[in-house]
Image (tube, rainbow, N blue to C red):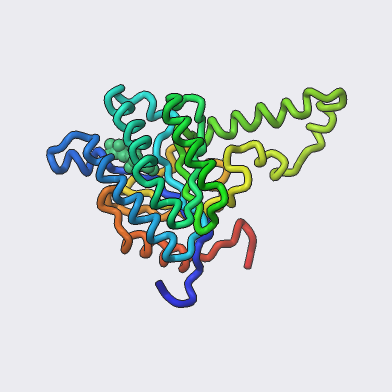
Amino acid sequence: MEKDSKIPAHVSIIMDGNGRWARERGQERVSGHKKGVESVRTCLEAAVEAGVKYLSLYAFSEENWDRPKTEVDFLMKLMFDSISAEMESLMKNGVRFRVLGNKARLNPVLQDAVAGMENMSRNNDRIELIVFLSYSGRWDIFQAAKKFAYQYLSQPDGMERLEKENDFAAFSQFLVTDGVPDPDLIIRTSGEKRLSNYLLWQGAYSELVFVDKNWPDFGKEDFFNALSEYSSRDRRYGKVK
Ligand code: FPP
């Protein structure tokens, strides 16, 4: 990295191309997911090295539940096994671990493992690793909108106060990302150029970097290249500089 480069506080990754990586090698799709866990570890190390404070990963979308049951079961077991296997190393390295999304849909054993790891790591502050599981941007905005509206409508003058509300921050505290800064940089692997229902609200001003490699082939150098690309961007947030 260049000495005076801008380091994003929050880097988020849409990990894509595991299935294609496996197919290109004549293997089952799930072997791509297994290999993808190595890229997760590599990127976490690179993020710590660079001084990134939040690394978030789109690991399983609400739409992914519609994949074949064998693949869904494999992915859920992979999450559980990875959390169990990495727990010690995450603690040793000061990583705060969190899962965000529609957690009620996860099986109770995975929910317990996640809650245990979140609780144990809650005071770690070197970096926060956020795994989005059973997440979609529209789901997040929708569940937040319901809670937001309920807060007003349960009061006698609620409709009137809701009409006058124009503070985005008052709304965004109901998103599952409350307290997490919006992603400065979103990286998507595999050459696809879309957001696929990810962080639709939070990504309003994120810089996007698309990388042609499939996720299992994405390494440290690719991560640093994406940071360099970010550093060269001119962020104006719709204003004139
Ligand atoms: C997208 O590739 C990848 C996924 C849906 C799963 C990613 C999950 C992991 C790598 C495991 C992460 C584990 C932890 C602990 C965070 P795809 O299946 O959509 O690939 P394709 O587009 O080539 O079919």
In the image, taking residue 38 as reference, residue 48 lies left or right, namely: right
Q: Nearer the viewer, residue 9 or 38?
A: 38
Q: Position of residue 80 (x, y in %)?
A: 37, 35
Identify whether 32 is placed above or below 63: below
Residue at x 48% of width, y 60% of height: 52
Residue at x 65% of width, y 41% of height: 172
Identify whether 173 is placed above or below 183: above
The quadrant of the rendering that contains the N terminus is bottom left
Q: Position of residue 96 (x, y in %)?
A: 50, 50
In the image, taking residue 161 as reference, residue 60 lies left or right, namely: left
The quadrant of the rendering that contains the C terminus is bottom right
Q: Looking at the image, which residue sits at the far left?
A: 26
Q: In the rendered image, which quarter is residue 171 located in?
A: top right
Is residue 193 visible in this depiction of the protein? no
Q: Looking at the image, which residue sits at the far right?
A: 157
Q: Quadrant of ligand 1?
A: top left
Is residue 18 visible in this depiction of the protein? yes
Residue at x 46% of width, y 63% of height: 230
Q: Position of residue 48 (x, y in %)?
A: 44, 61
In the image, taking residue 146 as reference, residue 131 lies left or right, namely: left
Q: Nearer the viewer, residue 118 or 232?
A: 118
